[in-house]
Amino acid sequence: MDKAIRVKICGLRDADAVDAAVSGGADYVGFNFFPKSPRYVTPVLAAELAARVPTGIAKVGLVVNPDNAALDALMSQTPLDFVQLHGAETPDRVVEVKRRTGLPVIKVVGVADESDLAQVAAHAAVADQILVDTKPPKNAILPGGNGVAFDWGLVAGLRWPVPWMLAGGLTPDNVADAIAQTGARQVDVASGVESAPGVKDAQMIADFVKAAQQA
């Protein structure tokens, strides 16, 4: 029987963090290939870390507006199960990335108000999964991982034709409430289980997964 709630721990940068996510019960582990992020890893390092991940836990590669050359280089170096598009990629580009990589695509859509929900629906028509995150401020350096939640009421009870994840400002303390308010069956966390930017905390990971699964 499938778990009621599935958890993604994103932005893993070292062996200890990967091991903590695996032992903590994560269903997905995420590697961040956006150079400006404090969670950035090279494809070569990510390949070493991916080797520590047991079968059955999905390995996700986060990229931001990648061109074809960057995608090809990543695919040739790092074994992944999903590509996560975290930039301004259009639905057409989502289709191209799926075809080029041969992998399912998780498309991140930032939400600040009700007007952003149309973008979620547009991408849900072509992506394999949707990740609904907090829309970053206009001049933000990072497209996500900023530790800020959006108004969960905007997506409460909404459903799309593909599975979706909730992200944005989730922590061990608020994840159960977020699940209760939105009905999300999958949750994603990066900064909410860190002791410092990019530094994962094993106890926080374990607490987050436990809180999510007990929600």
Image (tube, rainbow, N blue to C red):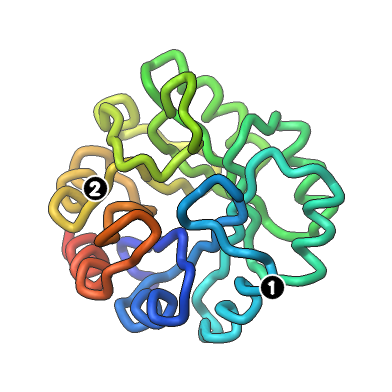
Q: Quadrant of the N terminus?
A: bottom left
Please say if 150 is above or below 69.
Answer: above
Q: Secondary structure at mark 1?
A: helix
Q: Disc 2 designates what residue?
A: 179
Mark 2: amino acid:
Ile
Residue nearest the observer in this picture, 182 or 79: 79
4 lies left or right of 72: left
Query: Looking at this view, is 155 or 47 the one in front?
Result: 47
x then y, percent, for residue 78: 71, 71
Taking the spot 52% from the left edge, 20% from the top edge, the residue there is 118
Q: Which mark is residue 44?
A: 1
The residue lying at 49 percent from left, 38 percent from top is 142
The location of residue 151, given as percent across then percent down, is: 26, 27
Residue furthest top as drawn: 115
Q: Tally the marks.
A: 2
Q: Which mark is residue 70?
A: none
Q: Residue at x 69, y 38 (%)?
A: 65
Q: Amino acid at mark 1?
A: Val
Q: Residue at x 57, y 41 (%)?
A: 86
Judge from the rendering whether residue 148 lies leftward or rightward of residue 80; answer left or right: left
- Label 2 vs label 1: CA separation? 35 Å
Closest to the camera, between mark 2 and mark 1, is: 1
197 or 133: nearer the eye?
197
Q: Position of residue 178 (x, y in %)?
A: 22, 44
Task: Determine whether 129 is above or below 193 in the image.
Answer: above
Q: Earlier in the sequence, mark 2 or mark 1?
A: 1
Classify the position of the C terminus by image quarter. bottom left
Looking at the image, is 88 positioned above or below residue 131? Answer: above
